[in-house]
Amino acid sequence: GTPFQSVTWNFGVKELFTWNVNNFTAPEYEGRITFFMSTGSLELRNLALTDSGEYTVNIFPPVGPSQSGTTRLEVYEPVSNVMVTSSSTELVEFSSSVSLSCSSSGSSLSFLWLNSSSEVTGSDKVQITDGGSTLTIVNVTRYDQGPFECRVSNPVSPVTSAQLTLTIYYGPENSILTISLPKEHHQEGSDISLSCSADSRPPAQFQWFLNGSALSDTGPELQLMNVQISQSGSYSCQAFNDKTLRYEMTPPASISVLGKFALR
């Protein structure tokens, strides 16, 4: 004999399979299910997302009352094709904002943003929206360049995107004018070398000034060869960044040139 008089499996309200004198299998489940008579259990193969839901079994033993049980099946599509795109990859410090979007295939997705492998959380200047798939940074600084990654997961798989690094332009700042071998007075006919530096991305362009008037000289070095008394005065250097469109002038440096006889 058999342990059951009949067994019926339902998916929601739909009859999926019945075992009794006349077995019944719903047409769309033909070839996808196996019934185990010894236990009344059912194996379901080639799962699709549409198989998610509530399954109920009703068992009628040879004697005694019927018994029923319910279980829930969740089917997930694995995560794949995770990609991060940026609204812009060239940004200006303190004035640009940027949105990073994470796209992915899969179902029941959760999103996590990483900056240099550390989790990114929301703050005054960082907004995470669209169910976690969009990261917006307001008024970026040079420390917001990343690299950024998006980790997408569901109960069956986690996948991390390729890294995305932002280019953030900043400066110029901390502009400094340096005189090699500085002296209180320089002898007429000697050579004097001045250099200018600034923290800037991209590297700053430099313009030299004497007593507030622009010289024709550009570049980080100014060479005064065979210097003349007329070249005495207050030298300064202006740094310019052609991406941020910002300028910064160095503090002035004074150069005094005296005739050869005056230095005796």
Image (cartoon, rainbow, N blue to C red):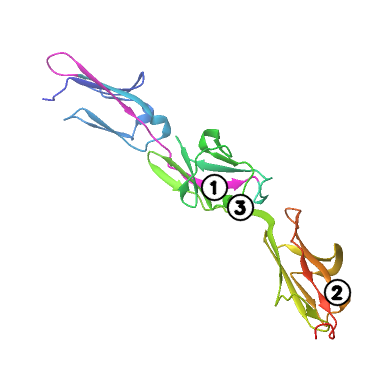
Q: Give the residue at mark 3.
A: 142
Examine the rendered structure and indicate whether residue 1 appears above or below residue 197.
Answer: above
User: Which-is-in-front pick, marks 3 and 2?
Assistant: 2
Q: Position of residue 8 (x, y in %)?
A: 26, 21
Quarter residue 18 falls in: top left
Secondary structure at badge 1 equals: strand
Highlighted magenta segment, given as a residue range: 60-87
For the point 58% across and 42% down, the residue is 101
> Which part of the image, by quadrant, shows the C terminus?
bottom right
- Mark 1 or mark 2, which is nearer the start of the sequence? 1
Q: Is residue 61 magenta?
A: yes
Instruction: Mark 1 or mark 3: name the one nearer the start of the chain.
Output: 1
Question: Which mark is in front, 1 or 3?
Answer: 3
Amino acid type for the residue under numbered disc 3 = Arg
Q: Which residue is mark 1?
A: 83
Figure check: 219 above or below 155: below
Crowd around label 1: few <14 · some 14–19 · many ≥20 (10 Å): some
Of all residues shown, which one is farthest toward the top? 65
Residue 174 percent coordinates (x, y): 67, 59
Q: Which residue is mark 2?
A: 231
Badge number at residue 245: none
